[in-house]
Image (cartoon, rainbow, N blue to C red):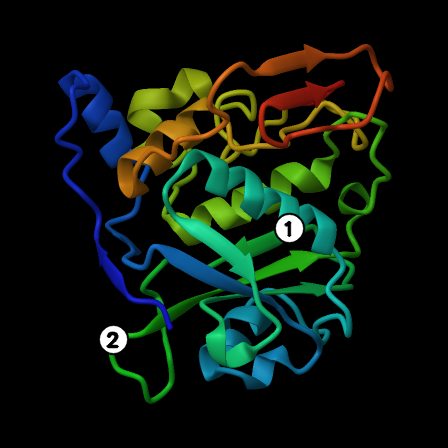
Amino acid sequence: MAFVTAKPTFSTSLPQSGKNLLMAMTDGTIWQDTTLQYYLGDDTALSIDTDFASNFYAYFSNSPDANYYFTALTDRAFAAISAAITLDFSRTTNLAEADQVLVSVDQSSNIEGFSTFAGVIGHDGQAGEYWSFTTLNSNVAQMRATPETGGGEYANWTILHEIGHSLGLFHPFEYPASQYIANMDNERYTVMSYTGAASPYGYGHAVTMMALDIAALQALYGEEDNAGGNSTYMLMNAQGGSLDLTGNKIAIGRAY
């Protein structure tokens, strides 16, 4: 099970303005473990922990989906985040190993999802141990949009956004982050924004964390060595080829 700790003081080579920015956009508590196990829950997930149910029913009235709706996108999101920071993630089917639990729900609502921060939900009867809980709405039209070949659909952005909360990232439009990055309150700079880089559902959205997110997460968890040696980055024409975010070969169409 996962433990939490206070976030670092960001004693880096950044100027003070940069440290102020990172402090303002990150929560005071982060994960202490070096690896987190995530579990994709079903319609029995609310019985796992009483706080799961109370958080869930604050927004939704239906039960979670019997089968988690966003498996492939969630796996890809965790892999992309892990490539940038020293914190690692692996999916588990054993609830006893879980640190992060995610469910989806089919409900007519304009709420696309929510996630708790590290250290908010403690394990029942296990002092000092914590887990996060995330819900994503599988009913919202833009969340169900079929992706364009090589593009980044709306659901990519939303899933990265909610995982970002679970790791300690704030919205850029809320105080105190807003005093530093009001002019960068856009998905192009941070997936924690509510302002999209593109309006279509099926393409033009983030498929990894963006620059501000990566800077903040690396300050919290450490910078990962990734894609050593020669790397190729290909920006394709619309629908010009499949999305590839692995290793030394990055290829995207209309995506960020």
Q: In the rendering, which numbered label is found on residue 74?
A: 1
- Counting from the top left corner in percent of width and height, residue 223 is at 33, 33
* Disc 2 secondary structure class: loop
* Disc 1 secondary structure class: helix
Whether residue 39 appears in this view of the structure is yes
- Counting from the top left corner in percent of width and height, residue 69 is at 76, 59
Residue drawn 49% across the image and 81% down it = 96
Residue drawn 58% across the image and 23% down it = 248
Q: Amino acid at mark 1?
A: Thr
Separation of marks 1 and 2 at Cα, in angstroms: 27 Å
User: In the displayed structure, does residue 248 sit left or right of residue 8?
Assistant: right
Q: In the rendering, which numbered label is found on residue 113?
A: none
Residue drawn 64% across the image and 50% down it = 74
Q: Which residue is mark 2?
A: 128
User: How crowded is the residue under tag 2: few (<14 C-alpha within 10 Å), some, or many (20+)?
Assistant: few
Residue at the bottom extreme of this rendering? 125
- Counting from the top left corner in percent of width and height, residue 99 is at 45, 67
Q: Quadrant of residue 135?
A: bottom right
14 or 186, which lies in front? 14
User: In the displayed structure, does residue 199 sit left or right of residue 59?
Assistant: right
Whether residue 256 appears in this view of the structure is no
Question: Mark 1 vs mark 2: which is more N-terminal?
Answer: 1
- Counting from the top left corner in percent of width and height, residue 152 is at 72, 30
Q: Quadrant of residue 65?
A: bottom right
